Amino acid sequence: MNREDELQAEMVIGDDARRFLESELGRTILGMADQEKTGALLGLAQVDASDAAKIRELQNVIWRADAFAGWLAELIQRGQDAENILLSEKDGV
């Protein structure tokens, strides 16, 4: 796979991620992740400070929710960057 093919693949994946986030399914899944995160944050406020296992469990829930949204945002950004590179190379810039 050459560089142009890689950039085009990143562009397609980024566009797929963007369309997923704009879809009902994407919005629903992000909403579910946000609800889990909110619940975990509330749990952290109430958990016994000496319960390290529960604290780690709640932190993992928060990390997973943040990571999922972050991965999608990263894919979208990489796709946009790839598109910009392809356009600038096409224009000879």
Image (cartoon, rainbow, N blue to C red):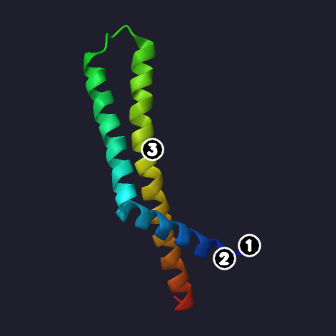
Residue reaching furthest to the front: 24
Q: Residue at x 37, y 63 (%)?
A: 23
Marks 1 and 3, the one that precedes in the sequence: 1
Q: Bin the neighbour count of mark 3 within 10 Å (Cα to Cα): few under 14, some 14-19, many 20 and up.
A: few
Q: Which mark is residue 1?
A: 1
Q: Bin the neighbour count of mark 2 within 10 Å (Cα to Cα): few under 14, some 14-19, many 20 and up.
A: few
Q: Residue at x 41, y 32 (%)?
A: 61
Q: Which mark is residue 79?
A: none
Estimate the x, y position of residue 42 in percent, counting from the top left. Answer: 26, 26
**Foreground: 93 or 1?**
1
Estimate the x, y position of residue 86 in percent, counting from the top left. Answer: 55, 81
Amino acid beneath label 1: Met
Q: Callout 1: helix, strand or loop?
A: loop
Q: Are marks 2 and 1 in contact (CB under 8 Å)?
A: yes
Task: Name the side, left or right, on which 38 lies relative to 67.
Answer: left
Amino acid beneath label 3: Ala
Q: Which residue is mark 2?
A: 5
Amino acid beneath label 2: Asp
Answer above or below: position of 88 versus 26: below
Q: Bin the neighbour count of mark 1 within 10 Å (Cα to Cα): few under 14, some 14-19, many 20 and up.
A: few
CA gap between label 2 and label 1 equals: 6 Å
Task: Name the side, left or right, on which 87 lies relative to 30.
Answer: right
Q: Which residue is mark 3?
A: 67
Answer above or below: position of 68 versus 90: above
Residue 10's quadrant in the figure?
bottom right
Residue 89's quadrant in the figure?
bottom right
**Foreground: 79 or 40?**
40
Q: Callout 2: helix, strand or loop?
A: helix
Q: Residue at x 33, y 35 (%)?
A: 37
